[in-house]
Amino acid sequence: MGEGKPKKPERSAAALAGRGNGASVHASLANEIGLRIVRGDYAPGTVLPNEAKWAETFNVSRSAVREAIKMLMAKSLLASRPKVGSRVEPRERWNLLDRDVLAWYATSPDRVTFLKTVQEFRHIIEPEASAFAALRRTEAQMEEISAACRQMKEAETLQARTEADTRFHLAILRAAGNDLLVPLGVLIEQAFNHLFMHVTRKGDDLDQAMKLHEAIERNIRLRRPEAARNAVRKLLAATDKVVGRAPDDAG
């Protein structure tokens, strides 16, 4: 932070906490500092301002700063060392599967890279997950997939469609019957939501996208693993075209 006379606090503790609830001040402060780290305000290796400076900047207690720093250390964004302070960790150490870190990453200036990263992850996971879902899904899981597909088609707003789209894909991950995919789906829910919001807003042919989702649903329902796998690949190829466009976007 800059030298010279003390500046007026950027945000009060109450503003950081949203409703002024002191118990949430440290979480809101962690959100503010974490966002700055992920968007590149503080490069890896940078030593952050000390507790006293953060407390002055945001008009919060030093104990709130201390708790916020602990939260960011738990997410592997920071490391704290005696007589050195809190240093920003190399990017490869960040826990990008953490919900908060994902949210900060999704709103950073490097958003297009984030969207492409999520899309690559989908290529790795979703075709096979859909094939397993076709083999293993229960009737209850199938109803969950089908309901989300219907809700996508019936949605009247961008947000409603995006939320149904996310539910659709997460339901397929659950139906795949692999225990590791269940918590993974929960962790990447925000990532999917950001991606689908972008794709739905920027896509040229929502009707075609809907047909591709319906093909996935149909093949899982009919227990056709190879057809389900191929249907997902077609959807991903269509999504690649939207994600790969130059970002006049990032909107």
Image: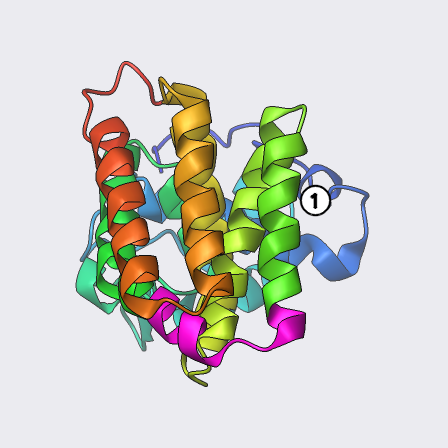
In the image, is 23 to the left or to the right of 99? right
In the image, is 142 to the left or to the right of 246? right
In the image, is 194 to the left or to the right of 111? right
Q: Which quadrant is the C terminus positioned in?
A: top left
Residue projecting furthest to the bottom: 179
In the rendered view, how is the structure colored? Answer: rainbow
Q: Is residue 110 visible?
A: no
In the image, is 202 to the left or to the right of 183? left
- Residue 30 vs 114, above or below: the answer is below
Q: Quadrant of residue 140?
A: bottom right
Q: Residues within 10 Å of mark 1 (few under 14, many from 20)?
A: many
- Type of residue at label 1? Ala
User: Looking at this view, is 84 or 78 the one in front?
Assistant: 78
Q: Which quadrant is the N terminus positioned in?
A: top left
* Residue located beneath label 1 in the image: 13
Residue projecting furthest to the top: 248
Residue ID at (47%, 33%): 197
Residue 28, horizontal then vertical, whole percent? 61, 50
Residue ID at (71%, 47%): 17
Residue ID at (45%, 85%): 179
Q: Quadrant of residue 10?
A: top right
- Residue 4 vs 151, above or below: the answer is above
Residue ID at (61%, 70%): 141
User: Looking at this view, is 14 or 120 the one in front?
Assistant: 120
Residue 146, horizontal then vertical, whole percent? 60, 54
Q: Quadrant of residue 79?
A: bottom left
| Dominant SS in magenta | helix
Residue 37 part of the magenta segment: no
What residue span does the magenta drawing correspond to?
A: 129-141
Residue 76, horizontal then vertical, whole percent? 34, 69
- Residue 106 vs 156, above or below: the answer is below
Q: Is residue 73 visible?
A: yes
